[in-house]
Amino acid sequence: MLLAAIVAAPVIAIAVAAMEPRWEVWRHLFETRLASLAWNTARLLVGVALGAGVLGVLLGWLIAVHSFPGRGFFEWALVLPLAIPAYVYGFVMIAFFDFTGPVQTWMRATAGPGAGLPDIRSYWGVVLTMSLVFYPYVYLLTRSAFAERGIVLVEAAKSLGQSPRTAFWRLALPLARPALASGLALALMETLADVGTVSAFSYDTFSTTVYRVWFGMLDRTAASQIALVLILFAAALVATERFARRRAAHTVSDARRTRRIEVSRGKRWLSTGVCAAVLGVAFVLPATMLVIWTARSVRAGTVASSYPSLVGNTLMIAVAAAVITVGAAVLLAYTARRLRSRRLRALTAVALLGYAIPGSVVAVGVLLVLSFADRIAGAALGSPPAFLITSSVVALLFAYTVRFVAAAYYPVQAGLARISPAMDESARALGATPRRILREVHAPMLRGSLVAASILVVVEVLKELPATMLIRPFGFQTLAVEVWERTNDAMWIEAAPPSLAIVVLGALLVGWLTRTGARQRALP
Amino acid sequence: MNGLRLSINGVTKRYPGSAGPAVENVSLDVEAGSILGLLGPSGAGKTTLLRLIAGFERIDAGKITVGGRTMSGPGVNVPAESRGIGFVFQQSALFPHLNARQNIAFGLRHLSAVERMAAIERVVELCALKPLLDRYPHQLSGGEQQRVALARALARDSGVVLLDEPMSNVDVRLRAVIAAELRSILCASHTTAVFVTHDHADAFAIADRVAVMRDGVIEQVGSPHAVYGSPASPFVARFVSDANFLPGRHCKLGVETEIGCLPCALSEGEPIGTPLVAMVRADELAPEYDPNGTATVEQAIFTGSTVTYSVRTASGQLLQCVVPSAWNHRVDVGAPVRIVARAHSIRCFSPAELAG
């Protein structure tokens, strides 16, 4: 209960702080930017929903029920873009397609100085980038939905004289709608939370505004109010996801059946081509660019000498965050399992909202809570409020816990769900004490879930940017922050080594999780 | 090992929020070393009763004693882990990270290494588990898992073992074999056993005595023969056999119905002409071809060893008749027939009982 309250505190703090009206800032915003901010955020969400939705469903359907060359490889490789932080992909896209980038330079060289592309730093550029980064959420969830029923539906439709296309539009897609809604909700949560990518594209949304109002205008209340708007957006997404999940029928699937549709040769290679193209643009291209730039950077000797300590720093904070977050998730999951109190469940739901809330908003909430704690501590010590905790590693870890406890909670909960009450009861009937049940039955059975949860948190912390930027103690640098600072100065080549480090670490962990099948269980 | 006597006295259990009690004023005595089958449809309270005995749930009223020791009663509630009662779950509930041997040893912590080995040896032999000991639960078939779970419960030498739907994961074709095996293991262990099932064939094959439950109440307790042969209520009759109910009147020899006079043991002093309902099982009736017959065969289902006929009588009632195929006796669908009863003694109910 206390733990749930602590984790939920930042969200509640924002709501409370936002109650204090700060109309001047609002009026200012309203007069100048609010309409365009709302419009920007809304059309970004719609665009990414369409882009990621179409890509994810198409790839999910291809992989789940078709057989074509390379299917087994693409099945897990198509998840890899999850390892690339959106802001890294963003700066690669900009560097690649910008006026001075290789593509346009080449076009001018071959087709004359008039040739070129529309500006990448536009709405379409952002939507394209984010769709390519966030489609894996839709892909993962729809793929498993299709795999469960797809082939049977296609065969049933064929026996009724319908084409596979009809089976897809009239049967498979409507049945996969809950999975699609869940996947889209996750993709849109990420979109909403993003600060790095949109600011690289100079595209303003609510998230970037929170950051600027907090730091630029130093107005906490106004920042909280904008943050509250974002929380409401996020809560709507979470509600959508929950609703979709509730309607998802949990049929027992015949997992051993691997029959797939055989299509003509041409179509088979077309499928391979589509998968290869998406993987190429979404993963191979950025990864290659990063490798090339890193090599150039090494040759030019511009790799910061602090690089090893940077990696060490990042890994250390990520692992520490994972340990704390998974610990909190385990406690929450156990409490939820034992107690059926409604109030506690509501508080747990708020605590789990963190995953949907942008990092900048979480940071604002954490800072509000901690400065309050600082003030209390200051009063208790009889000294003026000192920033004892506010700007420290502790604050950062707290923020990570709030933000990612849901990512850890769901795999832990899934693991606990596999320990049936009958398991506990039979251990009791065999004379085991509760402590022994915990040690000898639960601990070994949960190990896999705990590892999966920890890896997820590590990957998320590796990529996390906005909260880190807002809270990090002075001089504390992580890979993500380093990337952000370099790209802000358009130093693509210097930004490559830390980006590459994030991508490699992330890809290794994500790839490993997907291959062991844990990722599917672990998705919130 | 020796079984302990299990006594249940006026036990009631009510779940908050549900209309009626799940178990209501149930009293049962299970002799030491005997096997009791709790039989009933789902929702009858069988599993609840079993969980009350095990101590997973608290009773609201009554008393449960094992070997003379009060386990549940007014002011007493021995926790499940201290009752020393074995429990075998429907889904076996083996620990997936432990192999068969480790699963069996889980409850034997309190013993010395030598005693533990001996205990394992004993149940392994009893349950014929030797070749399976090093396997993990996912490498075992449903029946094998059930046997390991049983061995795990028996290894503690607990005196009473409870089994929740022990046959539910067993392949249909192996049912009879597994039931016989289960009975012989339980008999050889001399443990007192109570098991739950909704299948009367399983209950009859395994149990020494059967208790039929309905809506939290025990309707009848008796040997399988007694329950089958003279069901205490139309409900029990329907539940343990394919029973037909024929309305009729009390006559000199028994009951006069539209298919003739059926012999019936009647209570003394019932006046001739009292309305009665005769219960005749499907295997006691057979249609016989008769051009002047007033009944008609509507359906004949051939199952291999038997043929099941649905016959419409003159009054419009549909009767089920099961005839062994070996009789080589065929009647075509649509043929006029008369119905022959091959029963020595028919069980009769009053019309009021049938309505209840």
Image: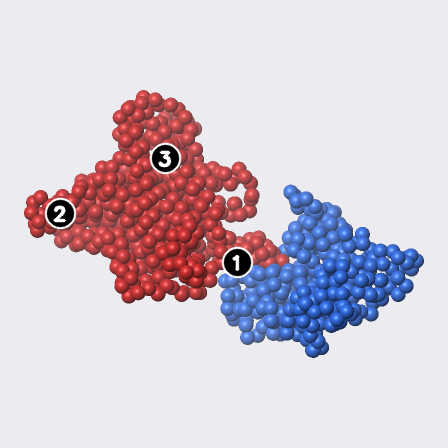
Chain colours: A red, B blue
Which circle marks residue A230 in the picture?
Answer: 3
Q: Residue at x 39, y 43 (%)?
A: A355
| Position above or below: A120 against B228 | above
C-alpha gap between disc 1 and disc 3: 44 Å
Q: Position of residue A298 (x, y in %)?
A: 16, 53
Q: Is residue A519 left or right of residue B30?
A: left
Which circle marks residue A104 in the picture?
Answer: 2
Q: Amino acid at mark 2?
A: Gln
Q: Amino acid at mark 1?
A: Glu
Q: Is residue A56 left or right of residue B73?
A: left
Q: Residue at x 59, y 67 (%)?
A: B170
Q: Position of residue A249 (x, y in %)?
A: 48, 52
Secondary structure of the residue carrying numbered label 3: helix
Q: The N terminus of chain B is located in which quarter?
A: bottom right
Along the line of sight, the residue nearer the viewer: B281 or A396: B281
Chain of residue at mark 3: A
Sequence order check, earlier mark of 1 and 3: 3
